[in-house]
Amino acid sequence: MGVQGTGKTTIGSALAERLGVTFIDSDDLHPIANKAKMAAGTPLEDEDRVPWLKVVGATIAANAAEGRTTIVACSALKRWYRELLRSSVPELQFVHLAGQRDLVASRLATRQHEYMPTTLLDSQFEVLEPLAAWEAGVVVDVADTPAEIVEAVVDYLASAEPTASGTVGG
């Protein structure tokens, strides 16, 4: 989870490869209307996100029902979004890829996204509710390299209490 440009797809796919599990980019699950809205530079509202988040949660749950662990790159910016996802998969763990706005903006300046303009970064930081101490997951500083982030998450998963939240990296 995290705002655009924090490396959700990069880290998620590398972590899935490292662990030998399934990777899904939740961007691929957005309806066309959401993609068009973002491409026009308009931030999504909660009513835009709820159906999408339900699809994301159902996809994770379907994979879990088939015995497949899934890593999903998903912004999940608000706590209640994460709770909605957990309603489908209660044991869900979150990796909050967190970074300073200036660092994230500098990374966005060097990439092209299919429909997510860099002008939406500020709105994402405004909406972001960082991972709370009571939420299952870990906060990782994106100033580290992708390899360091993946190793930090692997270490966290190997040693974590399922309901504990922690911070690594930086």
Image (tube, rainbow, N blue to C red):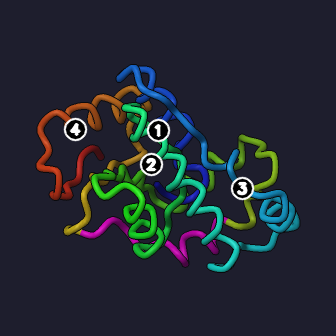
Q: Earlier along the polypeptide chain: callout 4 or callout 1? A: 1
Q: Tell me which numbered mark, 1 or 3, is placed earlier along the sequence.
A: 3
SS at mark 4 in the image: helix
Determine the CA span between mark 4 and mark 1: 19 Å
| Discs 1, 3 touching: Cβ within 8 Å | no
State whether residue 64 is above or below residue 100. above
Secondary structure category for the residue under label 3: loop
Q: Which residue is mark 4?
A: 157
* Of 121 and 153, the residue lying toward us: 153
Amino acid type assigned to the residue bearing label 1 in the image: Asn
- The residue that mark 1 highlights is 63
Residue 30 falls in which quadrant of the image? bottom right
Image vertical order of residue 63 relative to residue 34, above or below? above
Q: Earlier in the sequence, mark 4 or mark 3?
A: 3
Quarter of the image holding residue 35? bottom right
Residue designated by label 2: 61
The residue shown at (29%, 29%) is 151
Secondary structure category for the residue under label 1: helix
**Residue 61, x across and y down, in percent:** 44, 48
Residue holding disc 3? 30
- Nearer to us of marks 4 and 3 is 3
Q: Which residues are magenta?
A: 121-132
Q: Residues within 10 Å of mark 3 (few under 14, many from 20)?
A: some
Q: Are marks 1 and 2 in contact (CB under 8 Å)?
A: yes
**Of the residues under marks 3 and 2, which one precedes in the sequence?**
3
Q: Residues within 10 Å of mark 4 (few under 14, many from 20)?
A: some
How much space separates mark 1 and mark 2, taking CA atoms? 5 Å
- Give the amino acid type for the residue marked by disc 4 in the picture: Leu
Q: Give coordinates of residue 113: x percent, y percent.
A: 76, 46
Q: Residue at point 67% right, 79% down?
A: 47
